């Protein structure tokens, strides 16, 4: 991969990417079923994001891959070789896996070069120093090689942790919420830099995150977990445009959700009638409308078919966009919209609402939430 112009990074040593596979993996802690039949494969050179809420099993799956824990049943394989199964357990140091922790886990009493060199125990001192310096150069921190972690910023510490994980040139690198400790302004740049390095090393990467936007920015594929199971896996485009259920849709978009019953192929909502041709008469459905799918214009302006009147209850300026809370006639439920910041005059109250059909989704109501 070509280096970006003016990049601070040196060309990175290429790893031999491996395939990492989980086959029907279960993990129990007594009666608690943390992972429930996970089958998932990260292809060689792929960046796979494990996405989900807290407690969904993401970090547990990462720890099984690293060899820090052993599953209750099922198998973990690297390039088809079983590294954890009913009768096999390969220790972490023999798996060619790099691990990057959420808190970076740098040793405060060691210099940067010693932190990076720590994982190169199988080499002689001279070779280890050379490889460590090479890894530090890759992340643009050679001028800090003799410093201690406390003098570095959060973003620089994150780069040191990445250098340490990459120094042994692992075939798979595992990253547990690597950007969660960074402030918002720094996060975007460090994430982009990390992604560029991962692409250049060509190592297979599995990244744990609870942030859907981060998963979409980084992942070639995303596996969304909930309560120890994979709810849906695919590319960001596939999952966003064809979510399997309301949970998936809500994880990737802010939604207005209306419960209605289908009659004659339509469900009535506060935003108008929505076609539901695939649902039987009388069936309860959840109609989900993305907040970005509402066009809000001043009252009296040209409106498309199916428009409804509304009144602005509150609006919050967010820089490039605004969040609106709207009252709609005949509904006790407020409607939320996100619009471009310059779309509406500042003093306006009465508006017209149009819904873009591409941002409407229909799901059969879950009996548990009925």
Image: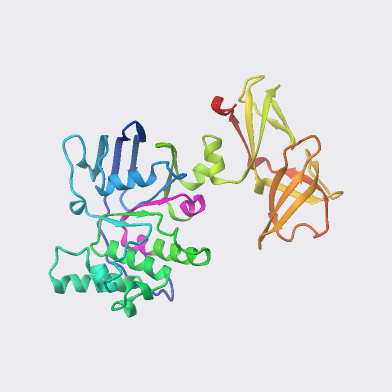
Q: Which residues are magenta?
A: 197-216
| Quarter occupied by residue 11 | bottom left
Please say whether residue 209 is one of the residues in the magenta stretch: yes
Q: Residue furthest right?
A: 300
Q: Quadrant of residue 13?
A: bottom left
Horizontal side of 253 relative to 96 (left or right) equals right
Quadrant showing the C terminus: top right
- Res 100 visible: yes
Inspect this view and state whether residue 19 appears. no
Where residue 224 appears, x then y in whole percent?
45, 42
Residue, far bottom: 143
Residue at coordinates 76% horizontally, 49% vertically from top-left?
A: 296
Q: Percent position (x, y) of residue 197?
A: 36, 64
Q: Is residue 11 above or below residue 356?
A: below
Rendered residue at 23%/46% (across/down):
79
| 181, 29: nearer the viewer | 29
Residue 198 lies, in percent from the top left, at: 35, 60
> Residue at left 33%, top 44%?
61
**Residue 11 position (above or below residue 32):** below
Say if the magenta span includes residue 229: no
Total count of labels: 0
């Amino acid at each position: 991969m070509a280096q970006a112009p003016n990049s601070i990074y040196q060309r990175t040593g290429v790893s031999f990417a491996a395939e990492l596979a989980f086959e029907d993996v279960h993990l129990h802690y007594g009666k608690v079923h943390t992972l429930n039949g996970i089958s998932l494969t990260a292809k060689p050179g792929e960046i796979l994001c494990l996405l989900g809420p807290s407690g969904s099993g993401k970090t547990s799956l990462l720890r099984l891959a690293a060899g820090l824990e052993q599953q209750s049943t099922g198998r973990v394989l690297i390039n088809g070789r079983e590294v954890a199964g009913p009768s096999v357990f390969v220790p972490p140091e023999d798996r060619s896996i790099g691990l990057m922790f959420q808190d970076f886990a740098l040793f405060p009493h060691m210099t940067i070069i010693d932190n990076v060199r720590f994982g190169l125990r199988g080499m002689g001192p001279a070779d280890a120093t050379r490889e460590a310096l090479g890894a530090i150069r890759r992340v643009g921190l050679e001028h800090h090689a003799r410093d201690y972690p406390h003098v570095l910023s959060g973003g620089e510490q994150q780069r040191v942790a990445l250098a340490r994980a990459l120094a042994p040139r692992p075939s798979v690198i595992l990253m547990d919420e690597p950007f969660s400790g960074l402030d918002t302004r720094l996060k975007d740049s460090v994430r982009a830099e990390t992604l560029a390095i991962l692409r250049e090393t060509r190592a297979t990467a599995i990244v744990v995150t609870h942030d859907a936007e981060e998963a979409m920015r980084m992942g070639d594929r995303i596996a969304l977990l909930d309560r120890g199971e994979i709810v849906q896996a695919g590319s960001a485009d596939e999952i966003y445009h064809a979510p399997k259920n309301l949970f998936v849709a809500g994880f990737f978009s802010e939604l207005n959700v209306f419960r209605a019953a289908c009659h004659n192929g339509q469900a009535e909502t506060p935003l108008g009638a929505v076609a539901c041709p695939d649902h039987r008469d009388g069936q309860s459905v959840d109609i989900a409308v993305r907040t970005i799918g509402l066009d809000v214009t001043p009252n009296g302006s040209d409106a498309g078919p199916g428009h409804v009147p509304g009144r602005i209850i509150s609006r919050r300026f967010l820089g490039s966009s605004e969040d609106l809370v709207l009252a709609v006639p005949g509904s006790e439920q407020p409607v939320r919209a996100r619009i471009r910041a310059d779309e509406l005059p500042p003093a306006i109250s009465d508006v017209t609402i149009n819904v873009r059909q591409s941002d409407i989704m229909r799901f059969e109501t879950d009996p548990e939430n009925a």
